[in-house]
Image (cartoon, helix red, strand yellow):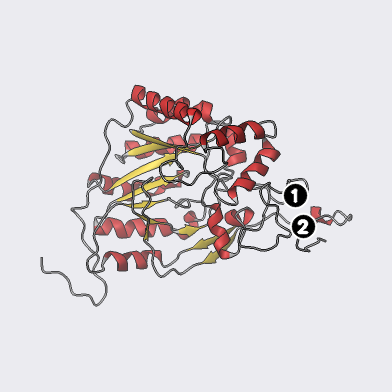
């Protein structure tokens, strides 16, 4: 059926979809077009037709759910590029399948691919709520805003079944602990009951990420995320429920979705957004090859132009992880994007006020067997 003999991994360029990629029918509903081995693997193997056409008989990739039981649930970071130090990721991997997702390379630490494995082999942190209670109750814990969705989406499709994100919000709600959320999913409106209650106490803000308003581009680029219209509707419902709402135009991909910046901001403002942000496309590690082969498959006429502009914003490289430059880029084109965003947000009245969430209401959970505080 296939030849799994190892071959050397190409150093930079992606395996072309027509030779090393995955058959279109097998990868339907997925963002990546291949399942290439990660940088920690010595060899890569892929299915190859032996002349009998048996590759056409293989089933489409199915989503596989695995359980992860971490020792801690709150992650810390020291990056000066982001506005939070603490975050929680209820899941590892993301079924949304966004081809540009900078979190894809994290799957390679598990010996899995940053390609289709990332969006089809998902890990659920079922003990997340209990861990969170324990960490919030620890002596000396100092409350600060915890971000959801910083790595993988907390409202990806499996949240409807596993409800890990909701269980975490319930813990934070009881403890009066601030939280910020960013998602591409309209599923967030399911939790409006909790979010609106927390918003009344100044404990929550929500951001919806919108990459494009073009349904065709969205379907190809982020196949299992909510449609752009659903995201705008979620923004409207959150805003009407009193939840402070922001829009994040991310990632901005030159020569692909950058003409939409002003339109996205205008539509989001009409839906109730009061704050806005943006991030330029990042291509760390395996993502560089995956994104290139996606362009070769879906937009071959734009590949050279997209990467030429990316290099112009990354000091001649296709990725620059330097703090202070990795989120926005540098150079004339990056400057132009920044000024367009700045002018549009000013015209629309976005970012006039930045909401700081409250920490003074925090009440640590009381664990079983733990003595309650007198005061």
Q: Position of residue 203 (x, y in %)?
A: 26, 48
Residue drawn at (25%, 46%), measured in percent from left and top?
357
Q: Residue 199 location, x and y as percent?
A: 27, 45
Q: Nearer the viewer, residue 56 or 324?
A: 324
x%, y% of residue 266? 42, 26
State whether residue 147 is above or below residue 260: below
Residue denoted by label 2: 47
Residue at the extreme right: 51
Q: Quadrant of residue 59?
A: bottom right
Pointer 1: what residue? 23
User: Which structural element holds mark 1?
Assistant: loop
Cβ–Cβ below 8 Å for labels 2 and 1? yes
Q: Is residue 271 above or below residue 362?
A: above
In the image: residue 291, left or right of residue 258:
right
Q: Residues within 10 Å of mark 2 (few under 14, many from 20)?
A: some
Residues under labels 2 and 1: Cα distance? Answer: 9 Å
Q: Which label lies toward us, 2 or 1?
A: 2
Q: Secondary structure at mark 2?
A: loop
Q: Nearer the viewer, residue 196 or 297?
A: 297
Residue 205 falls left or right of residue 184: left
Q: Quick check: can you spot residue 304? A: yes
Quadrant, the N terminus? bottom right
């Amino acid at each position: 059926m296939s030849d799994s003999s190892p071959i050397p991994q190409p150093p930079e360029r992606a395996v072309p979809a027509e030779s090393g990629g995955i058959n279109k029918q097998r990868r339907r509903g997925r963002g990546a077009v291949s399942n290439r081995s990660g940088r920690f693997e010595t060899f890569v193997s892929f299915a190859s037709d032996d002349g009998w056409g048996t590759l056409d008989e293989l089933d489409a990739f199915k989503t596989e759910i695995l359980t992860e039981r971490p020792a801690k649930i709150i992650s810390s970071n020291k990056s000066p590029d982001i506005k939070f130090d603490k975050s929680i990721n209820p899941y590892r991997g993301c079924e949304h399948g966004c081809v540009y997702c900078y979190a894809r390379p994290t799957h390679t630490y598990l010996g899995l691919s940053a390609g289709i494995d990332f969006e089809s082999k998902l890990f659920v942190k079922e003990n997340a709520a209990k861990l969170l209670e324990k960490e919030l109750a620890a002596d000396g814990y100092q409350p600060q805003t915890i971000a959801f969705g910083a790595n993988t989406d907390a409202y990806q499709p499996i949240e409807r079944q596993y409800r890990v994100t909701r269980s975490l919000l319930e813990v934070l709600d009881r403890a009066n602990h601030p939280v910020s959320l960013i998602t591409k999913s309209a599923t967030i409106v399911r939790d409006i009951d909790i979010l609106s209650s927390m918003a009344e106490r100044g404990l929550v803000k929500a951001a919806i990420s919108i990459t494009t308003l073009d349904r065709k581009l969205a379907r190809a680029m982020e196949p299992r995320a909510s449609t752009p219209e659903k995201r705008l509707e979620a923004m409207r419902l959150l805003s009407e429920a009193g939840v402070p709402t922001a829009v994040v135009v991310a990632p901005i991909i030159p020569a692909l979705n950058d003409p939409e910046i002003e339109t996205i901001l205008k539509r989001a403002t009409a839906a109730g957004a009061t704050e806005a942000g943006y991030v330029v496309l990042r291509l760390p590690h395996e993502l560089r090859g995956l994104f290139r082969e996606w362009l070769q498959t879906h937009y071959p006429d734009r590949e050279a132009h997209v990467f030429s502009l990316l290099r112009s914003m990354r000091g001649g490289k296709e990725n620059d992880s330097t703090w202070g430059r990795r989120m926005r880029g540098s150079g004339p084109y990056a400057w132009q994007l920044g000024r367009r965003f700045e002018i549009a947000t000013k015209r629309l009245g976005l970012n006039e006020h930045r909401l700081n969430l409250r920490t003074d209401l925090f009440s640590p959970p009381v664990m079983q067997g733990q003595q309650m505080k007198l005061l």
